[in-house]
Image: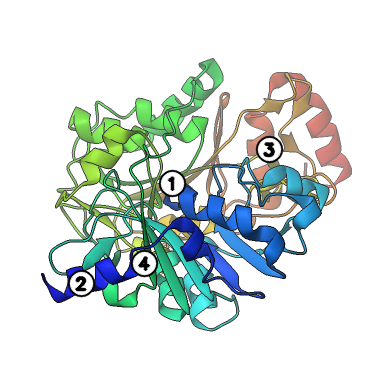
Amino acid sequence: MTEAQALYDNKRMTPTDAAGLIRNGDTIVVPTGVGEPPALLHALSERRRELRDVAVSQILPLRRFAYFDPDTRANVRHDAYFFGGASRPGGQAGWIDYVPAYFSELPMLLDRGLLPAEVVVSMASPMDEHGYFSLSLAPDYTMAAVRRARVVLLEVNPNVPFANGDCLVHISQVAGVVESEDALFEVGLPEIGSVQEAIGKYVADLIDDGATLQIGYGGIPDAVVMQLKHKHDLGIHTEMLGDGILSLIEAGAVTNRRKTFMPGRTVATFALGSHRLYRTMHRNPGIEMHPVDFTNDPYVAARNDNLCAINATMQIDLIGQCGSESLGHLPYSGTGGQVDFVRAANRSKGGKAFIVLPSTAKGGTVSRIAPVLSPGTHVTTSKNDINYVVTEYGVAQLRGKTAKQRAEALIGIAHPDFRGELREAARKMSLL
């Protein structure tokens, strides 16, 4: 028996015993999305009434564990880095708090102690012969938290791929190992309607062969992906690796050959897709998973020439401010990596940053292009960063344009039913 295997056997325990290592006052860092370990978080939920002042910090929780409970918030609470379906209701009701931050800067905030991290819980691949696990599903900010944590707990599952990249943790760094064989959480491609398809075509027409892509989360970015299968020698440097990107790889559109930074490799910081995606990641030399302060750092990502960043927003005003994370004052998601990649694409030689949105909301009764953002809206991407804005009615290119030129361009891609009132509002604001 190797020394690594002996350590593994000594640290193997039940989920209940692992949860017993959590102390009052601890902050537990959980990876993004599929990286969340269900057995460990169920065990934490079962124990929550024994604990006091424990926080769970995470981007995009996928399951509503029992600790999402306003009645036991004093015991175990959720502090969101970014809201998902499980945490959004609590965020909007006020019993879940959140941390405003750029995705790329979360590791730095952890390294500097500005964000606490006493415990890390994560999904992990089986250990290799050298004693290493791969946190392939979401190394994101988790690798930084591992460096600071008192306790690292891994839920080891044979369905988790062993991926290449800076996502490895050694058994000597781990306090407890819990084993499971449950199927991983799957997220399929969203349904794409005619509006999303039209937006996707406008964006795809502006993406050249050989471009490197960052694809955001949501139906419209995936609609863009569906229009790119005929392209050649695309590259990938992104935050989320999903089934849309997998479809481009399988179609032969992604080869990474013409990337000017890390050629030959698809680069991402978390995976969210199907079992087919997770299997494709396993020991694949063409895919690397890295922490988010590498993937999303605008200076690093911009080393890719012709970087095209595609991200969605919910509302934009007539000078180009984007509200991508709240409905008025009510939080909906979070800052995430949108600003990181908009800035990266703007810095990239030949790069293009796209912000995409349907022209209307609420069944066509509300224009998403507005004179001003709704009161209380959290500004995600500033007017100084925005370049291409795309709706189903066309493309507005904003960088280098005056405020009046921006207003004119944005009104031109608004829904025709709202252009008159937008023009009238713009005149009152001296924007036309």
Q: Earlier in the sequence, mark 1 or mark 3?
A: 1
Q: Which residue is drawn at 46% across and 43% down?
A: 216
Pick the quarter of the image with the N terminus. Answer: bottom left
Residue 156, horizontal then vertical, whole percent: 33, 54
| Quadrant hosting residue 13 | bottom left
Pick the quarter of the image with the C terminus. Answer: top right
Position of residue 392 relative to residue 137, above or below, is: above
Q: Name the residue under label 1.
A: 34
Q: Which of marks 4 and 1 is nearer the N terminus?
A: 1
User: Callout 4: helix, strand or loop?
Assistant: helix
Q: Which of marks 2 and 3 is nearer the N terminus?
A: 2
Q: Mark 3 points at which residue?
A: 408
User: Callout 2: helix, strand or loop?
Assistant: helix
User: Spatial distance from mark 4 to mark 1, Cα to Cα?
Assistant: 20 Å
Q: Which residue is drawn at 54% across and 57% down?
A: 339
Mark 3, mark 4: which one is toward the viewer? 4
Q: How many marks?
A: 4
Q: Name the residue under label 2.
A: 6
**Dot 4: within a 10 Å radius of its alpha carbon, few (fewer than 14), some, or many (20 or more) residues?**
many
**For this rendering, which residue is in front, 291 or 94?**
94
User: Spatial distance from mark 2 to mark 4, Cα to Cα?
Assistant: 33 Å
User: Callout 3: helix, strand or loop?
Assistant: helix
- Tell me if 49 is positioned left or right of 305 in this view: right
Q: What residue type is labelled 4?
A: Phe
Q: Mark 4 points at which residue?
A: 294
Mark 4, mark 1: which one is toward the viewer? 1
